[in-house]
Image: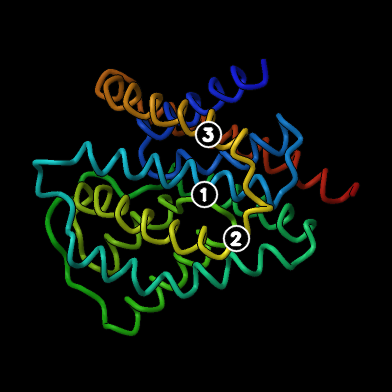
Amino acid sequence: MLVAELIVAGAFIGLLLGVLGAGGAIFTAPLLMLGFDVPPREATTVSLVVVLLAAMSGLFGHRGTRNVQWREGALFGAIGTFSAAIGSWLATILPERVLTGGFAMLLLVAAVAMVRQPKGHEERRPRRSLGIVAAAALGVGLVTGFFGVGGGFVIVPTLVLVLGFGIREATATGLLVISINSVAALSVRGPEYLDWSIALPMAIGAVAGSFAGAKLAPRMPRERLRQAFAVLMVGAAVLLGLQTALA
């Protein structure tokens, strides 16, 4: 029964990711912590696996298009591997209350970003200086490594505002950045933090759900869904905050 429930939970995450795009997978770790009583370190590690596989399947979906900027995305991701590794290491040594409380605040930030995502601009914009690009890449990597999230709600606006990408380029290239940072973060986590009996069924559900979500996306009221998901994240943030305070 637990396997079936994990597959369903993964499919829910995948549907969010497929329909909403950036930010959909951020709910993986809170769902595991609140719904399955998985400890924060293990939940964020499983989340990294789910995020990695979902991002790679999303990249596959962009085959044949020119939306993925491979060279720039690979460079941005490579810079972020250093901070992703550091963030992942910090997540294994800091008290779990810090991780849970930090996740509650991250969900609040993500909820705001979800309803204020950049919209509709496909033209290229001026690129920022190399120092700003490097700082942005390191910041994105740190978020991915520490919290075990894709960080798409951060990556997409960053690629638009810092590298000057159009929104479709940013969304597609963000999947490449997420994949690179997730691999770096997972390489630091020890096997004791990864329970494959949880990760595998959830990842299977997430990949299947992401394909289904991508098919449904053109027919779904995405803006209303973003608003509803933002409310859901605020609710999860409150629960995690209470859990932290009472621990």
At x 48%, y 34%, the residue is 203
Ranked by sequence position, the earlier of labels 1 and 3 is 1
Which residue is outermost to the right?
246
Asked if 181 appears above or below 126 in the picture, the reply is above
Residue contact between numbered discs 2 and 1, judged by CB atoms under 8 Å: yes
Ranked by sequence position, the earlier of labels 2 and 3 is 2
* Tag 2: amino acid: Arg
> Helix, strand or loop at disc 3?
helix
The residue identified by callout 2 is 189
* Tag 1: amino acid: Leu
Mark linked to residue 48? 1
At x 52%, y 67%, the residue is 142
Ranked by sequence position, the earlier of labels 2 and 1 is 1
Q: CA distance from mark 2 to mark 1?
A: 10 Å
Q: Position of residue 98 (x, y in %)?
A: 75, 61
Residue in the foreground of this view, choosing between 106 and 83: 83
* Tag 3: amino acid: Leu
Does residue 136 appear left or right of residue 229 in this picture? left
